[in-house]
Amino acid sequence: MRRPCLPGAAGATAEAGFLFFAMRYEGAMTELPRIAHHPSTCPHDCPSACSLEVEVIDGRSIGRVRGSKRQSYTDGVICAKVARYAERIHHPERLLHPMRRTGPKGSGQFARISWDEALDEIARRFLAIEAEHGAEAVWPYYYAGTMGLVMRDGINRLRHAKRYSGQYSTICTTTAWTGFIAGTGRLAGPDPREMAQSDCIVIWGTNAVHTQVNVMHHAIKARKARGAKIVGIDIYHNATLAQADLALVLRPGTDAALACAVMHILFRDGHADRAYLAAHTDAPDELEAHLQSRTPEWAAAITGLEIAQIEEFAALVGTRKKSFFRLGYGFARQRNGAVSMHAALCVPTVTGAWQYEGGGAFHSNSGIYRWRKSLIEGLDVRDPGVRELDQSQIGRILTGDAQALRQGGPVRALLIQNTNPVSVAPEQELVKQGFAREDLFTVVHEQFMTETAQMADIVLPATQFLEHDDIYQGGGHQHIMWGGKLVEPAGECRSNHEVICALAKRLGAQHRGFDMTPREIVDWTMRESGRGTLDELIANEFLDVQPDFRTAHYLDGFGYRDRKFRFKPDWPKVPNANAGPVGPWQDMPVLPDQWDVLDNVDAEHPFRLATSPARSFLNSTFTETPGSVKKEGGPTLMLHPEDAARLGVVAGDEVVVGNQRGSVHLKAVLFEGVVRGVVIAESIWPNAAHKHGRGINTITGADGPAPFGGAAFHDNKVWIKKAIPDQKGVTALP
Ligand SMILES: Nc1nc2c(c(=O)[nH]1)N[C@H]1C(S)=C(S)[C@@H](COP(=O)(O)OP(=O)(O)OC[C@H]3O[C@@H](n4cnc5c(=O)[nH]c(N)nc54)[C@H](O)[C@@H]3O)O[C@H]1N2
Ligand SMILES: Nc1nc2c(c(=O)[nH]1)N[C@H]1C(S)=C(S)[C@@H](COP(=O)(O)OP(=O)(O)OC[C@H]3O[C@@H](n4cnc5c(=O)[nH]c(N)nc54)[C@H](O)[C@@H]3O)O[C@H]1N2
Ligand SMILES: [Mo]
């Protein structure tokens, strides 16, 4: 697996490596450091899952991280925050040894203990809680801080072997995936590299410049090579729209209205592919009749767009059959998100764009991998009778909400890996109250002292991806990738797998996965899933598993039994959930339509707030690295200059933004690129970066959108006030 230095790059990399080396080992500059270049995979929670080339210096430190040119989706391009990864792996504030809380909860007072002490205490407490309250009182809680299949999902093996409470993972993908699968019956699409063959690329509800830079790379290639047009659709003129040929800024949660009007025009102007519709879709005539009244005028009133903009967009995708719809997560984080995603997906179906190379719609390829995960997750020992608790409702769960607890007993112990709910979960006031409970025993396995780790009783130090072995898959592409251990763990850090296995032993949990190495688990999983062996993967670095053209474009049929695309999904039966339907699902529109279940403005809350992603942070990750913090500056609120004037706010003023859940302090930035009445807080800063320690998720809600739940992070009605400092310069809590 070890690769020699790449020829050609040696001069530049040796220089960069030397500077880095000189910085870290001052004085020892007589010898040039040895630099080796190793392939790896970015583990962060991102559709791009980039293939990397990592400089390893003297087997200990890393230097630069680059995008691999060998993997054709990454194509040599990665984001700046990962290129600077040395900052994160060699960060002076990494957690290096286990700790036990010594002061009150959340005081930040901890004392160092040994691994054996830590693991023994966790096991003793978990066993005592299980004996007294039953196994469901323990809730292993995790998410995608690492996307490695073994390190991310292995916690489920312990959960299932012990019959601990289950996790229904809703915080990110539920509404978006449901909306997509509602149409296609499968979570997969055309090869994203086909963007380079497109004549029009529609980047809808994803700020790709921030969240998945490779999309821009492939789209701009198509523009350069073939004059492709790039359309961007968002609720503010963000960094992606700044690069678009046609930038559509609409009101939050009105994407389905836009989609309907576009389809109306396509039928009206003869750009609907009727032969394709008859062969491949469920109800084209009903759709056409339904769209009669969904005119551009109707949509303009709802979306706030000009009629001419809607006409221009429809003409583009109507005349350019090779239109590639890159549908993001963002516009599905509204309470009507599943309906909006489905409506947008219907547009390329009406034009028949799916038939062409460079045409169709892509959201995620997560459905193509079909892993056999029984070894990783212990699915073979899972008891389906055990309750599943909604990840997004952790605040309600920890504060004893009977419905959120599924009418069962309270959660009395948490084991947390790869996630930082005290910062990222909605209804933050409840989350904080829950974590502060004296009768809750909390274990957090982390790389940094996050705001969740600060609330723990026991903190365990975790390895980073270059310090352990794992396997990864691309959501935004189609590669299975290897990321092997390249450097020794910092301090006493242990991997998620080591911790889960060590706890399993002490807890009496039985599963053969607890006695295997990550490499053995990966090898078994690859073989059983028909993906070859681990040795082959390591030799090749990655495996391109893109389905063939006809399958990816659904030319032999969509994922439903009758092979038809659904304009009329049976929403409660869309195959994307192991939970029953929630929210007002009975009222979901039968055909694509604007569905008004949004957190609409009222007299007390005249603004709509979205919490869009920052470029230099990844959720709350990278809020610890100086390079990212410097780039982001501080927590801000973008608002339209006219709105600001009405509020008596000037640029740089401190404003308070709030609703029934609480309020947050931010610094005003005036920006013409937001629609009047809409405000944007880019990024999830640590709560502590805000006055009174209240982070942006103080405002967001955990009421699960229909049909299967989720978190509508960008759908919030709010009031805004200019903060008025008292004589001491301190703003009071409103
Ligand atoms: N730099 C960076 N990269 C990231 C992340 C990050 O935080 N920072 N997060 C990672 C994760 S976990 C994920 S899931 C992905 C998500 O990546 P994306 O698919 O990009 O989704 P979001 O980040 O939620 O939001 C994308 C855009 O949707 C817009 N939006 C909000 N509401 C609406 C609406 O009603 N209509 C329309 N048309 N647009 C709307 C937002 O303003 C934002 O610009 O990115 C990953 N990559
Ligand atoms: N307001 C608002 N809130 C949001 C969003 C939004 O757009 N707006 N986006 C939502 C979305 S899409 C998502 S996916 C969630 C994500 O929220 P989280 O899942 O909490 O993601 P991060 O904030 O990146 O935190 C991941 C943590 O995992 C740790 N970690 C990384 N690798 C490992 C490992 O190998 N082992 C262990 N033990 N720990 C590790 C990191 O140090 C980091 O602290 O946030 C959601 N919250
Ligand atoms: Mo996410």
Image: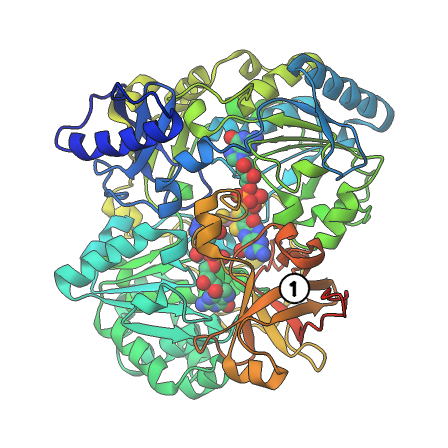
Give the image location of residue 536, x and y in percent: 28, 20
Extreme-bottom residue of the structure = 297
Picture layout, residue 492 above or below residue 720: above
Q: What residue does disc 1 label? A: 665
Work out whether residue 481 can be spotted.
Answer: no
Give me the residue at 47% from left, 30% from top: 149
Give me the residue at 47% from left, 82% from top: 304
Give the image location of residue 60, x and y in percent: 38, 20
Is residue 575 found left or right of 348 in the rendered image? right
- Badge 1 density bin: few <14, some 14–19, many ≥20, Cα 10 Å: many
Locate the C terminus by quadrant: bottom right
Give me the residue at 69% from left, 38% from top: 454
Is residue 120 found left or right of 547 in the rendered image? right
Which amino acid lies under the numbered mark 1 shown in the image of this protein? His
Locate the N terminus by quadrant: top left
Q: How many labels sit on residues?
A: 1
Give me the residue at 30% from left, 74% from top: 246
